[in-house]
Amino acid sequence: MSEVSTEPQAQTQAQTHVPRLTLNSDGQRHPVLNAFTVFTFIGGIAAFALGLIVSAHLPAAILGIVVFAVGMVTQMMSATREQRIFIIAGIIAGAVGAGLAIAHGGFG
């Protein structure tokens, strides 16, 4: 007859939860909205960076205004909270970049 151990056994597998970044938290795919969201975010950061450079005032002004316009339309169509967060960050960065560019010479 074998003896049954009453001691709890240690789990051999460690359960780790790795958070992943997704814009589709509602479980549905939104490829066009995600593309516009990424464009708004990356374009806003680029417009902000270019707006800090005095000699790059023309591309910064154009990019900032385009990002602002695209971001505003994308914001109205956004489906998830994550999209809205990135869109607003891109809109703000694009607007600040355009403002800096206009202050450095704008379209002239």
Image: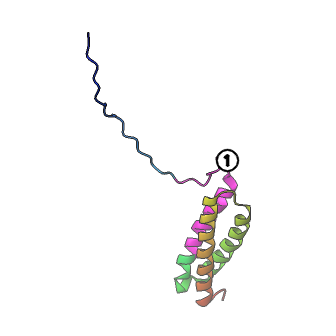
Let me know if residue 51 is in the magenta part.
no
Q: Specify the segment rendered in magenta.
A: 21-47
Residue identified by numbered label 1: 28
Label 1 element class: loop
Give the amino acid at mark 1: Gln
Please name the residue shown 26% across and 9% down the image: 1
Q: Is residue 30 above or below residue 13?
A: below
Please name the residue shown 60% across and 90% down the image: 103
Q: Does the magenta stretch mainly form a helix, a strand or a loop? A: helix
Depth order, front residue of 49/28: 28
Position of residue 25 measured from the top left corner of the image (x, y, whole percent): 61, 51
Depth order, front residue of 98/59: 98
Q: Is residue 21 above or below residue 1?
A: below
Query: Residue 43 sits in which quadrant?
Result: bottom right
Position of the C terminus by quadrant? bottom right
Position of residue 15 measured from the top left corner of the image (x, y, whole percent): 40, 41
Q: Is residue 19 above or below residue 42?
A: above
Depth order, front residue of 16/99: 16
